[in-house]
Each structure stands twice: as structure tokens, then as C-alpha cells.
Image (cartoon, rainbow, N blue to C red):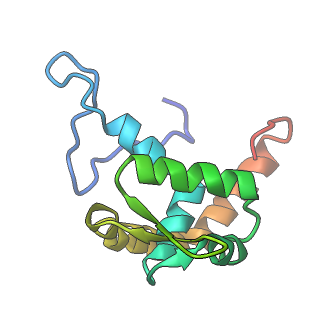
Amino acid sequence: MSPTHTGVTPGPAELSPCGQKDHPDCGIRDVLDRVGDKWSVLVIVELAGGPRRFRELQRAIDGISQRMLTLTVRRLERDGLVLRTVYPTVPAQVDYRLTETGASLTHLVKALAEWSLAHRSVIAEARSEYDHKHPDHDMR
């Protein structure tokens, strides 16, 4: 073991990884790909405050393109996390809201956001230290 290597200590929860002989692929990866996607998380955060129209979501989520927002809400709708409602007006009005399943994610997303805020300076410092030690890497 190198002098800079740190031992791995178990966290508070023991998790069985998917794909092992006694724990086959359980679909966790598929679900986490969706709810862990940065745009999905931001859409869920916005919709936690109540229904939003498409343009309201787009204005609230800095940096998201119209195409990416369209794809994100469609995927969340397909997964049963977001409900899209079209109102019979001229022009048609559409709003998006969390389903019961989507709303059940909000406390987890909030906890992740709070953890991110609490640890962002430590992570930024670790990244800076890593970048200094490994000037040739191309990770960002």
C-alpha cells in the first residue's frame, strides 16, 4: 500500500452491489441514471414548489436548452415522476407537476442538495489539490 493510500472504511449503510452472484442486476443503475442526472434533479427541485409551465422551468434552470428540457421532462414523464397536463386553450397551455412518486423523491433530492452545499468547499479543495498533483490529467 502506498503512503498516500487511505483505507476504506464502511459507511453507515451496508449496500449490496448489483450484479454479484447473490444479488443480480436489480435495476438500480437504470433508476439512478434518471434521477441522478443533473437536469432531472434540477427539474424535480423546481417542480417540488408546484406546477410549472415549460418556459417557467426553462427560465428557472440556468443553462438548460429547450431540447434538453424537452427530453428531460419526457423521460421523467415516461418514468412516472412527472405529469404533463395540456389545457384546451388557444394557444394550448401545458404544465408539469410531480406525481406522487416524483414528490416522494423531493426529500432525497433536498438532502443531496444540502449535503452538496455543506461539502462543496471540501470538494473544491480536494479537486484543486488533485489537479496540482496531477497536472496532466484531463478530468473536469
Viewer-side residue, 30 vs 70: 70
**Residue 49, image x and y in percent?**
45, 84
- Which of the 4 image quadrants contains residue 7? top left
Q: Is residue 38 above or below residue 98?
A: above
Viewer-side residue, 90 vs 6: 90
- Which of the 4 image quadrants contains residue 127? bottom right
Viewer-side residue, 72 vs 131: 72
Is residue 112 rendered to the left or right of residue 99? right
**Residue 12, image x and y in percent?**
23, 57
- Residue that appears at 31% across and 47% down: 9
- Residue that appears at 76% across and 58% down: 65
Q: Is residue 37 visible?
A: no
- Which of the 4 image quadrants contains residue 100? bottom left
Is residue 82 rendered to the left or right of residue 94? left
- Residue that appears at 52% across and 72% down: 88
- The residue furthest left is 22
- Residue that appears at 77% across and 45% down: 133
